[in-house]
Amino acid sequence: MNLKKHRFTKKKKVRHQASGQRTFASAQAHAFLNGLAAVAVIAFISFYFFLTPVNPQSIPFWLTVIIALFAFAAVKSLTIVSEAASRMQDQASGDKTWQDICGGECRLFLLPIIVIVGLLLVALTGSPIFSAQKYASILNVREAVFSDDLSESLGTDSIALMDTASARMLGDREIGSLSNVVSQFNVSDDYTQIDYKGKPVKVAALDYAGFFKWIGNKSEGVPGYVTVDPVSMSASYAECEQPMIYVPSAYFHQDTARYIRFHYPTLLLGNLHFEIDEAGKPYYIMSVYQNTISLFGGKTVTGAIVLDPSTGDLTRYTLADVPNWVDVVAEGDLLCEQYNWFGTLQNGFMNSLVGKKGCKRVTTYETDDNDENDDVPVSDYGYVSKNGDIWIYTGVTSVNGDSSNIGFLLANERTGEAHYYNIAGADEKSAMSAAEGEVQEKGYQASFPSLINVEGHPTYIMVLKDASGLVKLYAAVNVEQYNIVTTASSQAECLTRYKRLLGIESGDISDSSQSGSSDHYSEDAAGNSDTSNNTGNSTDIEEPTAADHEADITIADIKYIDISGNTYIYLIADDDTLYRAKAAAHEDMLLLKKGDNVHITAYGKDIVTFEKQTQQPNN
């Protein structure tokens, strides 16, 4: 009897062990399938919504892999723990218990950590620390002759002065007059600077005005686009022969970026923008990139994908085969970054940190105070239309951060060709300040300038806008002597005045009451003009006889400058405005000192009358 009981107990134990083994095997399979399901969900979200390329050179691709590995480990471990919750005292397999199995699942979390460490090592090997010369050689920069590249024959109609903010204002105004369009569509904020029939033009497509507008209009599509002429400062609406279906403001399968990604899942893509060909037919262009240094370093453009938004036809081009009408393949920001690699790393990485011998970079500016990245200097550039292409222009300065340029860079946004001109002068921000200073009483703001050739003289040309963004004046500033400034109400007149200052073009200035040789000429939109000499190379400054404004100022500084044998008193106010007067005509001003409060009347910045005040002025 005892023997039978022992045998029965032994068989029961064996059956229990077998049942435990089957339970463990099924739990492992269940956990593995749950982990795969989590990976599939993460991959779908990453590819469909974030448009992550299936390419090991893509950082988002590896982020997806790491997140998926963590998710797999977490879901599989949680499933095993859930299965083990009611069986902690059971033996699962051999001598292993469920406690042992749950502890072993933690080893799965080592895999994504190993991947992270490996990627950090790969990124380090491809950084400028070890590959400075490779980075410096990505952009092929050729030294060129300024007067040959930017010939006088380009003319004023090749100068693209309008910034995107002004283009948006004109485009919105044009669409606002079309009642059948404005109720369903907006003008895209993403204006593209292109060369259209030999002239610079900004273009932007219409956007659906929200999700429900897309639902109501997706079968008909987007009807047209807006062109803005930066020379004549005018906008016009163009209706497409066939409406555009695949646009960035659409959703799901009609979204432009998603549509292109699904057709090219492995390519590194970016810089999606709108252009038109020479016949006015709309297209969307997307640049194709490749990292040339290790996995993540040395970003370069290798080609472009052209989408017909009306039909959905896609064409991929290598960089050498991109059609001539396509203007932007290598975007300006990337070209500036590549030049900075060239300028700072050509003598080695350590030199870029310590000695900085020969280091140079494109000029930068601080973003406005409302920008969340306001502490980060960013590059800025202008545009020049030349030989059917758009070239970006930017100054080149030393890494020491002074306010002067040592040269200029001109780079082709279609081909990536880059030319460097060894011309020293003021940087763009100094030129903008000089232009704004000529009409400081009006409070106009200068746009980022373009670089032109005026009879061999490198010249900044820009527009001056009022607070509402309307263009009021044009300004020309000499690069090498940025105290030579002219302003006028038209671009052609501004350049005519500028040439007269340089002695290139003879003739009397239109306002005979202000006639005389000068190094400054300004004219506002109403035709009021002001001439003066501020370099000491010609006759003295003409004394104004009538004022156009008055002001109460507190003197922050006083300077005495000799011009053509005459002493001039310069008053610098505490708000950084500047006024001047001839000492011989205003001898009492010699008694003024820092901190004095003065009431003045002035014409421009030339003082007509002044009165010293005994109390702090009320502004």
Image (cartoon, grey):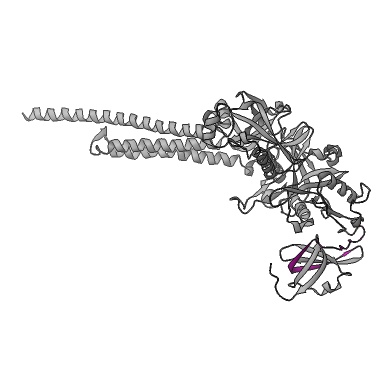
Judge whether residue 81 can be spotted in this image: yes
Residue positioned 78% across, 53% down in the render = 435
| Residue 581 position (above or below residue 350) | below
Residue positioned 87% across, 69% down in the render = 583
Taking depth in this image into account, of 601 and 496 the one nearest to the observer is 601
Q: Quadrant of residue 401?
A: bottom right
| Residue 127 position (above or below residue 1) | below
- Left or right, residue 235 beside residue 461: left
Image location of residue 400, percent across then percent down: 72, 54
Judge whether residue 308 can be spotted in this image: no
* Bounds of the magenta segment: 538-563
| Residue 466 position (above or below residue 100) | below
Image location of residue 293, percent across then percent down: 63, 36
Image location of residue 525, percent across then percent down: 79, 50
View extreme (left): residue: 1
- Left or right, residue 243 beside residue 387: left
Taking depth in this image into account, of 19 and 63 the one nearest to the observer is 63
Residue positioned 32% across, 36% down in the render = 80
